[in-house]
Image (cartoon, rainbow, N blue to C red):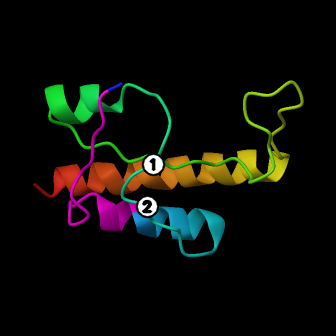
Amino acid sequence: MHPTRIPVDSPYCEPIMDAVADGWNQEPIVKPSSGGSAPYALFTNYLELPHISIPYGQQDNNQHSPDEHFAVEHFEKGIRTSARVLTAVSSELSSK
Protein backbone atom coordinates (compact mmCIF):
# COMPACT_ATOMS: atom_id res chain seq x y z
CA MET A 1 0.00 0.00 0.00
CA HIS A 2 1.13 3.54 -0.65
CA PRO A 3 1.73 5.72 2.42
CA THR A 4 -0.33 8.79 3.09
CA ARG A 5 -0.52 11.65 5.54
CA ILE A 6 -2.77 14.67 6.00
CA PRO A 7 -1.59 17.93 7.55
CA VAL A 8 -2.12 18.15 11.32
CA ASP A 9 -3.66 21.58 10.73
CA SER A 10 -6.40 20.10 8.54
CA PRO A 11 -9.75 21.67 9.46
CA TYR A 12 -11.01 18.15 10.25
CA CYS A 13 -8.42 17.32 12.92
CA GLU A 14 -9.70 19.52 15.73
CA PRO A 15 -13.41 18.61 15.43
CA ILE A 16 -12.52 14.91 15.22
CA MET A 17 -10.17 15.12 18.22
CA ASP A 18 -12.93 16.87 20.18
CA ALA A 19 -15.42 14.15 19.19
CA VAL A 20 -12.99 11.41 20.27
CA ALA A 21 -12.31 13.17 23.59
CA ASP A 22 -16.05 13.46 24.17
CA GLY A 23 -16.74 9.83 23.25
CA TRP A 24 -13.98 8.39 25.46
CA ASN A 25 -13.92 11.04 28.23
CA GLN A 26 -10.20 11.56 27.74
CA GLU A 27 -7.90 13.37 25.36
CA PRO A 28 -6.87 11.31 22.31
CA ILE A 29 -3.30 10.36 21.55
CA VAL A 30 -2.54 11.83 18.14
CA LYS A 31 -0.08 10.06 15.88
CA PRO A 32 0.40 11.71 12.48
CA SER A 33 1.42 8.37 10.96
CA SER A 34 0.52 4.79 11.69
CA GLY A 35 1.60 1.36 10.55
CA GLY A 36 -0.53 -1.20 8.84
CA SER A 37 -1.76 -2.05 5.40
CA ALA A 38 -4.94 -0.43 4.24
CA PRO A 39 -5.91 1.54 1.13
CA TYR A 40 -6.01 4.94 2.87
CA ALA A 41 -3.91 6.55 0.13
CA LEU A 42 -6.78 6.01 -2.29
CA PHE A 43 -8.75 8.58 -0.31
CA THR A 44 -5.99 11.14 0.20
CA ASN A 45 -3.88 10.79 -2.94
CA TYR A 46 -6.51 10.04 -5.58
CA LEU A 47 -9.85 11.28 -4.27
CA GLU A 48 -8.22 14.21 -2.43
CA LEU A 49 -10.21 13.41 0.72
CA PRO A 50 -8.64 13.46 4.19
CA HIS A 51 -8.22 10.22 6.08
CA ILE A 52 -8.01 9.95 9.85
CA SER A 53 -8.02 6.56 11.60
CA ILE A 54 -9.67 6.21 14.98
CA PRO A 55 -8.93 2.79 16.48
CA TYR A 56 -11.39 1.56 19.10
CA GLY A 57 -9.74 -1.70 20.16
CA GLN A 58 -7.92 -2.15 23.41
CA GLN A 59 -4.17 -2.63 23.67
CA ASP A 60 -4.38 -6.35 24.47
CA ASN A 61 -6.99 -7.41 21.92
CA ASN A 62 -4.55 -9.74 20.09
CA GLN A 63 -5.62 -8.35 16.74
CA HIS A 64 -5.70 -10.92 13.91
CA SER A 65 -4.78 -13.81 16.21
CA PRO A 66 -6.92 -16.87 17.05
CA ASP A 67 -7.83 -15.36 20.44
CA GLU A 68 -8.67 -11.87 19.16
CA HIS A 69 -11.25 -10.14 21.31
CA PHE A 70 -12.99 -6.79 21.62
CA ALA A 71 -14.39 -5.40 24.86
CA VAL A 72 -18.08 -4.49 24.81
CA GLU A 73 -17.20 -1.20 26.54
CA HIS A 74 -14.89 -0.29 23.64
CA PHE A 75 -17.59 -1.26 21.14
CA GLU A 76 -20.11 1.02 22.88
CA LYS A 77 -17.65 3.91 23.17
CA GLY A 78 -16.74 3.40 19.51
CA ILE A 79 -20.39 3.71 18.47
CA ARG A 80 -20.81 6.94 20.48
CA THR A 81 -17.53 8.31 19.15
CA SER A 82 -18.42 7.46 15.53
CA ALA A 83 -21.71 9.34 15.86
CA ARG A 84 -19.87 12.35 17.30
CA VAL A 85 -17.23 12.22 14.54
CA LEU A 86 -19.88 12.10 11.79
CA THR A 87 -21.66 15.07 13.37
CA ALA A 88 -18.38 17.01 13.71
CA VAL A 89 -17.32 16.35 10.12
CA SER A 90 -20.76 17.20 8.72
CA SER A 91 -20.71 20.46 10.70
CA GLU A 92 -17.26 21.25 9.31
CA LEU A 93 -18.44 20.55 5.75
CA SER A 94 -21.62 22.59 6.10
CA SER A 95 -19.66 25.61 7.35
CA LYS A 96 -17.74 25.81 4.06
- Estimate how packed mark 2 is, as few (under 14), some (14 to 19) or many (20 or more) residues with alpha carbons within 10 Å: few
Q: Along the line of sight, which residue is nearer the eye, 2 or 69?
A: 2
Residue segment shown in magenta = 2-16
> Residue furthest toward the right?
67
Q: Point out residue 80 in the picture as x, y percentages from the top left corner.
A: 61, 53
Specify whether 7 is left or right of 61. left
Q: Which residue is mark 1?
A: 34
Q: Quadrant of residue 38?
A: top left
Q: Quadrant of residue 3?
A: top left
Q: How many marks?
A: 2
Q: Point out residue 42 in the picture as x, y percentages from the top left corner.
A: 26, 25
Q: Point out residue 86 in the picture as x, y percentages from the top left corner.
A: 41, 47
Q: CA distance from mark 1 to mark 2?
A: 7 Å
Q: Assign the magenta stretch its main secondary structure.
A: loop
| Above or below: residue 86 compared with residue 31 | above
Q: Which residue is found at the position 15% from the left and 58% from the top?
A: 95
Please tell me whether residue 17 belongs to the stretch shown in magenta.
no
> Are the residues at dot 1 and dot 2 in contact (C-beta closer than 8 Å)?
yes
Secondary structure under badge 1?
loop
Q: Is residue 47 visible?
A: no
Q: Is residue 38 visible?
A: yes
What amino acid is found at the position of numbered circle 2 in the picture? Lys
Q: Point out residue 84 in the picture as x, y percentages from the top left corner.
A: 48, 55
What amino acid is found at the position of numbered circle 1 in the picture? Ser
Please tell me whether residue 5 belongs to the stretch shown in magenta.
yes
Specify whether 40 is left or right of 57. left
Q: Along the line of sight, which residue is nearer the eye, 94 or 46?
A: 46
Q: Which residue is mark 2?
A: 31
Give the position of the N terminus as an image quadrant: top left
Specify whether 72 is left or right of 42. right
